[in-house]
Image: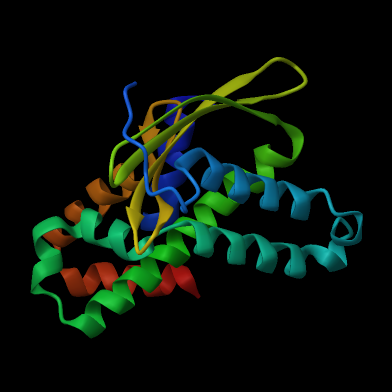
Amino acid sequence: MKRVAVIGLMTLVVLGHSSLVAPALAAGPQERVAEMLDGISGVLRDPALRASDGEPERERRVRTIIFAAFDFEEMGKEALRSRWSTLSPGQRQEFARLFGDLFERSYNRLVLRFLGERKTTYIAESADSNRGVVQTILESEKDERLPVEFRLTYKDARWRVVDVVLDGVSLAGNYRVQFDKIIRTSSYETLVQKMKTKAR
């Protein structure tokens, strides 16, 4: 996938090695990413879910895995930056849920399109006490290679994904730019309304 294609996809969704060891009992960043990707691959390759009538259940299972693996509250906080501190607890919860819906739809499309037919190779892992990075390559049978970097945070005794970088393009960062543009040219309320419309 070309970088411009990734950016275009994300825009459409919104607008239309040194490392310290994490706590011993917690799975590391790479283990968490592998758990997520293996779970999704298992769903995509399940013969019982490949038929057209299995699509709703397949999407439901993939969504469940993604929501368990990602920290959408932290992602929402990073996306809104200083604006986040002005929101009430209820508004923060609503935004995190809407952001999760948007991100899951885009990432789900990318996963369904590529993961089921490609092999994941783990290149490198780095982590400190609360931040981790896992670098992977998605390889197709035609020897096409897509670099995918997962960025994670350690909170509440577990690692969770907060960004996915596809061929150098940060999906969370791309959302942040789009959110900021909508807020600057219109308002936060307009952004939320657009997100609600997309979530329908």
- The x and y percentages for residue 152 are 38, 46
- The x and y percentages for residue 149 are 45, 32
Q: How many labels does the image show?
A: 0
Q: Residue at x 30, y 77 (%)?
A: 93
Judge from the rendering whether residue 192 lies leftward or rightward of residue 164; answer left or right.
left
Residue that sits furthest to the bottom in the current view: 90
| Residue 88 vertical placement versus 72 (above, below) | below
Q: Nearer the viewer, residue 161 or 100?
A: 161
Judge from the rendering whether residue 156 lies leftward or rightward of residue 55; answer left or right.
left
Quarter of the image where the N terminus is located: top right
Q: Which residue is drawn at 33% across and 69% down?
A: 96
Q: Which of 53 and 197 is in front in this view?
A: 53
- The x and y percentages for residue 183 are 16, 61
Q: Which residue is drawn at 24% across and 55% down?
A: 79
Judge from the rendering whether residue 187 lies leftward or rightward of residue 26; answer left or right.
left
Q: Residue at x 37, y 44 (%)?
A: 22
- The x and y percentages for residue 95 are 30, 72
Q: Which of 23 and 159 is in front in this view?
A: 23
